[in-house]
Image (cartoon, rainbow, N blue to C red):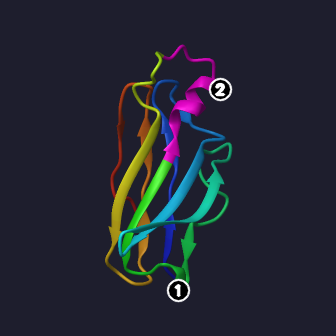
Amino acid sequence: MGKLSTHVLDTMHGCPAQHVAIDLYRHENGTRSLIKSVKTNADGRCGEPLLQDQEVAKGQYELVFHAGDYFAARGVALPSPRFVDQVSIHFGIAEEGGSYHVPLVVTPWSWSTYRGS
């Protein structure tokens, strides 16, 4: 029962980041294909896994988090252009059917990720 999941934490405000738009892409043979677009809920998570079971296939993927739009909607004064705008995380799935959690910890000035469980 594998899955790919994510969540977003806003460390500027010290809370889960709700209503962040996220795009999931697969990279294969030089082609970038959109798999899914979602938004985070009140807990900063998606309502369901981005991929699950047999959808969790070996390969190269990319998550794009629309963090700049999130902070702008919260009324944060941002420079133009924004320092952190769209956060793109490229990662690989090496284990067919494995469980992967790729969270984002973000402010308007920095971001980080890790492989969670």
x, y percent for residue 83: 39, 25
Quarter residue 72 falls in:
top right
Q: Which residues are magenta?
A: 65-78
The label shown at residue 73 is: 2
Tell me which residue sits at (58%, 32%) in the image.
69
- In this rendering, is residue 25 above or below 78? below
Tell me which residue sits at (63%, 18%) in the image.
75
How far apart, in angstroms, are the residues tagged by discs 1 and 2?
Answer: 36 Å
Q: Residues within 10 Å of mark 2 (few under 14, many from 20)?
A: few
Q: Are marks 1 and 2 in contact (CB under 8 Å)?
A: no
Between 66 and 18, the residue placed more toward the observer is: 66
Earlier residue among tags 1 and 2: 1
The label shown at residue 54 is: 1
Q: Amino acid at mark 1?
A: Gln
Q: Amino acid at mark 2?
A: Ala
- In this rendering, is residue 77 above or below 101? above
x, y percent for residue 61: 41, 65
User: Which residue extends farthest front?
Assistant: 30
